[in-house]
Amino acid sequence: MAALGVFLCTTLPALGSSNSCERTAISANAALHPQDGPHVDLRFRLDKEAFVASLSMNLVFLDWMIEVPREDTERIDPSELAVLGPRLEAYFAAQMPVEIDGVRVAPILRDLRLNDPDEVLLPLFPISGWRGLRKVEFFLDYPVKSAPDTISVVWPAYPPDLLSVLPSKPPLEIAVEWTADGLRSQHTFTRAEPGYTWRRPTGGIEARLERVPVPPAPQPLIPAWMTLSIVVFIAGFVAAAIARRPPRTALGSGLLAAVVVIVLRPSGPAFLAFGTRAPRELPAADATATFEALQANLYRAFDYEQESAIYDALARSVSGGLLEETYLGVRRALVMEEEGGAMSRVVAVRPVRTGLVSQGEIALDDGRRVRAFKVEATWQVDGRVTHWGHSHDRTNEYDGRFTVAAEEGGWRIHDAEITRQERVDTGDSPAPAPQPSAEDEEL
């Protein structure tokens, strides 16, 4: 459970804990996901002073997009960057309109550089050769004066997919990651739908999470309203009797006084409640709905960029040692992303079956006993990894047993055990995928 929601080296292509792990993953998945032909790695980020597009494209993509005169068609010499830079800036200023709060903004190109390709990967590019492996990398800055509410982008370039088996090669789909306002999301540009508009989300963490029902509170054996009504009835009856009213009148006065008090103060003061009885058991439907909301929120924590936000979101779903364990698993995945360059995200979580097993109490680490229930669940996770400008989807299915406890902040997943994990999508090729270890495959 430590790596819940995290894609590791062998789980999805090209994401690992080190550069050597990345190369191993690429080699192992070469038959499954060859990265030949044109590609561009595209990411957008909203910073305080600028909306930034980060691009890394190979020479096949670059040559399709603009004319790049150079001495050697297989490479770009560093001395030729002085000519390439203005051409790229002019191309994107004209062909990729970016509107910030409805105003079109021109880009400023910076940090244009060339990659240092690993010749070990050259066999993966039988069509493109060195032009497929060599890349230009740069940033486009779109200045912002204040935090924008909307940003619109239209992506212009869709070279043909040279790996397609169709006689007429279809245009590539361009996968992109968008980071803004502390959240990361994925999008795909296509020739049919080349535009995307980001809108600033409203509300905090709670606005993005599923609503989790509140645990039922213990109920007093004698509620306050009952004690209050009895006291008022007796007082009204005694007062009528002292005034020498007929017994029927005295009884009616007491009942009337009790009804008036209950209407005006239906709950009664807390000090008049006596005794405590255990909360009622949850209906099975309520228990399964509670768990599924917690599970969905656990995965949504991965949408956040800052460590503090990830931890806060996770703390609304899991507790105790499981919280720290899950948080560290997420952090390890983020570090691996920084090293390997791949983007790996949970796209969707779908409950398949959730069944209530039992209800009762459990002891927490501090000795307190709290209400809890256990469920057995089957669910599917859709994941997407983006690398070399391509995205690949896979779906895994899991079985697990979970204990959900009524903590101080509400229901939390207190314990978990994954009992089965299986890839259920068809993949992109009939070639078998590498078999991951149990830790690496966990989502």
Image: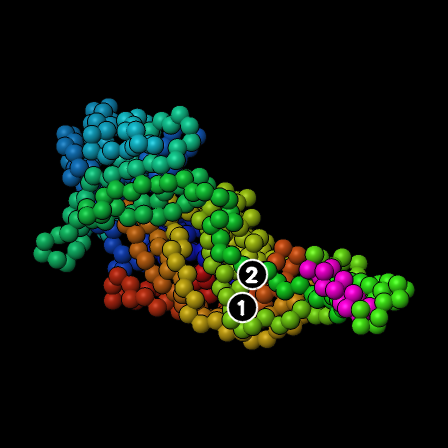
Q: Please state the horizontal and vertical placement of residue 428, each as a whole percent of the image.
A: 26, 61
Sequence order check, earlier mark of 1 and 2:
2
Q: Which of the labelled discs sits on residue 104, or is there none?
A: none
Residue 80 in sight from this viewpoint: no
Instruction: Give the residue drawn at x 29%, y 42%.
Output: 196
Vertical comparison of 82 with 293: above or below: above
Is residue 380 rendered to the left or right of residue 224?
left
Element assignment for label 2: loop
Amino acid type, callout 1: Asp
The residue that disc 1 covers is 286
Instruction: Give the residue drawn at x 15%, y 52%.
Output: 170
The residue that disc 2 covers is 213
Range covered by the magenta-colored residues: 250-263
Name the quadrant containing residue 273. bottom right
Point out the residue furthest to the left here.
167
Quarter holding the C terminus? bottom left
Name the quadrant containing residue 34. bottom left
Give the Cα separation between the discs numbered 1 and 2.
8 Å
Residues under numbered marks 1 and 2 in contact, where contact means CB atoms less than 8 Å apart: yes
Q: Indicate whether residue 255 is drawn in magenta.
A: yes
Amino acid type, callout 2: Pro
Instruction: Give the residue drawn at x 53%, y 64%.
Output: 290
